[in-house]
Amino acid sequence: MTSMTGPDPMVARHRLIRAVRRAREEAGLTLKQVADALDWSESKLIRIEKGVVGISVTDLRALLAYYGLRDSGHVDRLIGMARSARRARTAWAEFETALSPDFLLFLGYEESAAAMLHFNPLLVPGLLQVEDYSRAVLGGAYVAPATHVDEKLRARRRRQQRLDAPNPPQVDVVLDEAVIRRAVGGREVMARQLRHLAEVSDRPHVSLRVVPFSAGLHPGLGGPFVILEFEDPAADPVLHLETAGADVTLRDQPAAVEPYREAFGRLQELALDPVASRAFILKVLDETWGDRVPVPGGSLGSRR
């Protein structure tokens, strides 16, 4: 469990944002009043409270003083969180030109998550993509012009390292059948991608399920989403939505997350179980992509 001044920078950032917003509301101040008093732009304060930008210790001290917080112990704890939170902001800073601010925010939370719930009706999630598949997706301008492809690939490889870490997160993935049948990058790329899915699904910390076409309409047809959960019970779950227009990362909004959590549970019910899903992936690998190369952990058609 992470303490208030603990080592997890994203949990610290999460708590700091919430504490700063609460302090303003308890002081009965509007965003405009605070911005005018400190000679800041209102948009700066909005970005701070939304977590889009970090906050310096100097700015935090100014805010707390204006809000009338005089408890030195409480102020010191918030300052400690600000210093810890800055590590989260710089962890992915090298990718600022390649990735959107909202996606960078998501990556910081993802790095701290104890559990991840992924649903995708369109593509293999980036966390489970092989490089050739990723290159085909990024180079094909799926949601944006094909820019900074190499940097995005490097960020994706770094994300995937968590799956091989000594204490990996629990990863629950549900895919629509269309994902494993859609030709992305050609036959050889799809064969490698499905072999990888079959292999990674055999790991104890990964659960992979496939919703077959026979399930008909289901609650995931609106688009892909990710829910991140944290070991610290005080940290609310984070919801990430990937749309054609932009990445959207929501935190401190449990009411917004709950419908997606319910949808994920329903999708798990509609999907094949993990053993049957792995066998189904291997079957599609054989029949659709013409690949009979054995997969570590079992031969084609295995229902282990």
Image (spheres, rainbow, N blue to C red):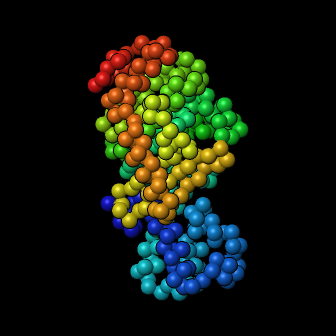
Q: Is residue 104 left or right of residue 79?
A: right
* Above or below: residue 247 compared with residue 18: above
Residue 161 position (above or below residue 259): above
Q: Tell me if I can see residue 260 in this picture.
A: yes
Nearest the viewer among 122 and 20 is 122
Quadrant of the rendered structure where residue 184 is?
Answer: top right
**Residue at screen point 60% across, 60% down:** 52
- Look at 66% across and 31% down and name the residue there: 139
Q: How many marks?
A: 0
Residue drawn at x 44%, y 85% is 71
Task: Return the x and y of residue 185 as percentages of the image width and height.
Answer: 59, 23
Compared with 135, 41 (above or below) is below
Q: Nearer the viewer, residue 205 or 94?
A: 205
* Quadrant where the C terminus is found in the figure: top left
In the rendering, at what x and y percent does residue 222 appear?
Answer: 56, 45
Looking at the image, which is closer to me, 159 or 138? 138
Give left or right: position of 280 versus 289: left
Q: Quadrant of the N terminus?
A: bottom left
Is any atom of residue 130 visible in this view?
no
Residue plotted at (58% across, 68% down):
49
